[in-house]
Image (cartoon, rainbow, N blue to C red):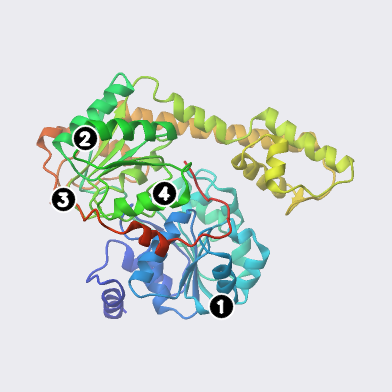
Amino acid sequence: MTDNLNKALEKYFGHQSFREGQREIIEDVLQGKDVLGILPTGSGKSVCYQLPARLMSGAVLVISPLISLMMDQEKQLAASGYKDVIAFNSFLSVQKKQDAFRNLAAYKLIYASPEMLQRKGFVKKLSELRISLFVVDEAHCISQWGHEFRPDYLKLHHIIETLQHPPVLALSATATPEVQKDISFQLRKPAMARHIYPMDRENITFQVDELETPSEKIKRISNVLKAHPVPTMIYFSSRNWTEKAAAELSAALPDMNVAFYHGGMEQSDRILIQQQFMNDQLDVICCTSAFGMGIDKQNIRLVIHFHLPPQIESFIQEVGRAGRDGLSSVSLVLLSPNDDLLPRKLIQSELPDREEIARVIRYMKSRVQQGVFRLPEQDMLLESLQISETKWRFLRYHFENHGMMDNDRIVSSFDWETIQEKISRVAAERTKYKLAKVNELLWWAVQTECRRKALFAPFQDTTKEPSYHCCDRCGFKFSEWAPVTKATRKSESYNWKQALKQIMLQGDSDEEIKSG
């Protein structure tokens, strides 16, 4: 099998050797085992199911949480000549979506969001196929303790059962032992073969700078980029700050091209910015967490965190977008007083509080009393309830879990007060857990030990020997950094109108899977 896999890897992907963990996972997948794979960001997790899709009979179904991730992988495969792939997302025109449904059996690799799998017609169509492998990408989303908890992921075991229990491959870059156990439990796959590899990358160096104000942060970024004009991603927790910082850095760095990216932009603008960055026409992206997942740009040298993300797992994933070519790259965190307030505020706004839960319960109870059991369309419902879509997803999952709802229909009357108290306790427990994750990252930023060892301690027992520099606690200074810089920027005459026409198919709108 070894020689055959090496030949297949070179034939389909042009690589002469596997990266750490890829071969072991693929061999188990091809033997029909259920597999949990934890590999560092940038290690090529997608090959673990894309290569089996070429070799197995039947179709490989990939559950992915982000539209841009699906699109990017579909585009890369199509560019390499692999046409038997389809990604169901909002960029499919109505006509192409209908054609894809009719000809679903023609595809070897099918991407879909967990929300798409709540459509009974789509699942029925999938059940008519032979699904040889069921892939859960970004599998930490399935765990209630994962940093991107998504309630619809918790329903995947029902889909697996409907599809006659195909082998399952769950992949993630950041999952603590606690989350790994929960992934296996939630998928109802207790005997998964586990391939858990160290998450740290030897070529990434860590530094934290403590500053007093946001203005000082902008000045620090300007000085770093003047000395080291390298491809850079700067993460913010605020959409407004991405735009403000991009404007200020553009003025301070006239020789560099700077742009912003966030979930509030038009989809066509986001795709344009993404493609320009991938093609080296942009040097610096000021972005929210909406940017980066699935972006396989090899030469990002610097990832800066202007704001702290809400947990270590997100931080590790975002840092892991640097240095995918193995060359020296740096993670720079800019810390100032009260930087914890924004992530705490965001966490407390994610889940419904007691008053909101009580208000929704009263609304449902009143409909039952009126003999109206079906809920209105989601937009009307959210407006009536005055809650966000994220909060409604959380509540809907728990209503269904308690047998109160079936699709959009309230099943019957209940002990409303008991249900209300149970859901309130779960929301409070979840919020408390997430706030503790903020404290965990804050502790990491201010502790005095080796940053690499402290960062990865919750995930693994040891860390790798750095290829270049370790961290500022171990003596790193930016003045000593000698990164590889690009010689020339690609031609500015690239026809982006034509590029957009090729990569975009405006159509009906599925829900946006993630924003920021």
Between disc 3 and disc 4, whose residue precedes?
4
Q: Amino acid at mark 1?
A: Asn
Q: Secondary structure at mark 3?
A: loop
Q: Amino acid at mark 2?
A: Leu
Q: Which residue is mark 3?
A: 486
Quadrant of residue 103 within the rendered picture: bottom right
Quick check: can you spot residue 198? no
Residue beneath the point at 43% across and 32% down: 240
Q: Position of residue 293 (x, y in %)?
A: 39, 51
Q: Amino acid at mark 3?
A: Lys
Q: Label 3, label 4: how many angstroms apart (C-alpha)?
A: 24 Å
Nearer to the camera, 317 or 268: 268
Q: Label 1, label 3: how many angstroms apart (C-alpha)?
A: 44 Å
Residue beneath the point at 68% across and 31% down: 356
Between disc 2 and disc 1, whose residue precedes?
1
Q: Secondary structure at mark 4?
A: helix
Residue beneath the point at 65% across and 36% down: 387
Q: Secondary structure at mark 2?
A: loop
Between disc 4 and disc 2, whose residue precedes?
2
Q: Which residue is mark 2?
A: 253
